[in-house]
Amino acid sequence: MKFETGKRGLLINILSLIVFTLVWQILVILARNDIFNIPFIRLRDIPTPVETWYALAGSMFTRIYGPSFTYGIINHVYASLVRVIEGGIIAFIIGVPVGIGVGYSKFLGNLFNPIIEIVRNMPPMAWIPLSVFIFVSGGSIFIVFIGVVFPIILNTIQGVKSTDTRLIDAAKTLGASESMIVKKVVIPSALPSIMTGLRIGLGVGWMAIVAAEMVIKSPVGLGYFIWNMGDLGRYSEMVAGMIVIGVIGYIMNISILLLQRRYINWVD
């Protein structure tokens, strides 16, 4: 039954993408032939899915033009992914211990909660000017870190506070130390929430890296690619880059969900 439901869901997903692509193609063609248009939207200037596909295929690999060359989308994807992974790892290493400490200790909660609540409401993009000013290099990674760390911290705190107090009391009755309670009871209980925080955080970090690469003007990265293609008027390549960003973000989200279901048996 689950298998059939999964197949049905996959079929619906594929059909929805096909319908979306057809509607996109039809609307642009109708606009270009002055049959249909939407006020205040330049539909005729939007690349069709076919044009976008050819632009994607043509921009996939690095091209050499005499003494100069143009990075392919694969190079831009790699650069952006490396920055997101590096920023995500740093955020995970810092965010999980902070979340556990703040969630488990009332003293640490009172100490750090005001700081966390104030700083987390600052959008990652608001940090871009400061990161450009402070960091000689690695500003983009810092923006990813800001985007990832707070979802991890908040979800970890929630996971820790949701730990069944009966389990903690039982561990204390058996003579477990505070460190053992955290290690053997609190962390396993909070692990699903930690993974949820990582999944949400990486989504925010992936969006943040694109904006950071646009503003910081990294020589290579998907954000830079999209901005550069827009400046050059190569809108098919620009839209292709946007689609690549969406697809990679979707794959990242699905990958973490699959890891949760595979290795964390108590995740719904």
Image (tube, grey):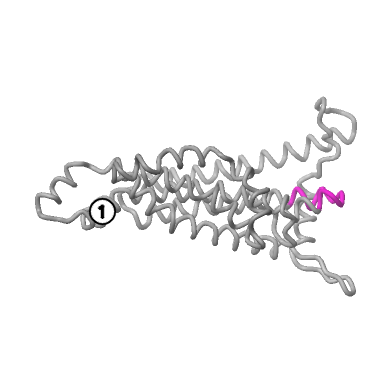
Residue 79, above or below 38: below
Residue 87's x, y, as percent? Answer: 54, 58
Judge by depth and name the residue closer to the eye, 223 or 212.
Answer: 212
**Residue plotted at (50% across, 51% down):** 254
How many circles with numbers are drawn on the protein? 1
Residue that extends furthest to the top in the rendered view of this protein: 39
Residue labelled with disc 1: 182
Residue 216's x, y, as percent? Answer: 72, 54
- Magenta highlight: main SS: helix
In the rendered view, does 2 fall on the left or right side of 166?
right
**Residue plotted at (86% across, 37% down):** 44
Judge by depth and name the residue closer to the eye, 151 or 264.
Answer: 151
Where, by quadrant of the figure, is residue 103 drawn?
A: top left
Residue 133's x, y, as percent? Answer: 68, 54
**Residue plotted at (43% across, 43% down):** 5
In the rendered view, does 99 fall on the left or right side of 184?
right
Highlighted magenta segment, given as a residue range = 229-240
Residue 106's x, y, as percent? Answer: 29, 41
- Dot 1: element: helix
Q: Quadrant of the C terminus?
A: top left
**Residue plotted at (43% across, 38% down):** 114
In the rendered view, does 260 fall on the left or right side of 226?
left
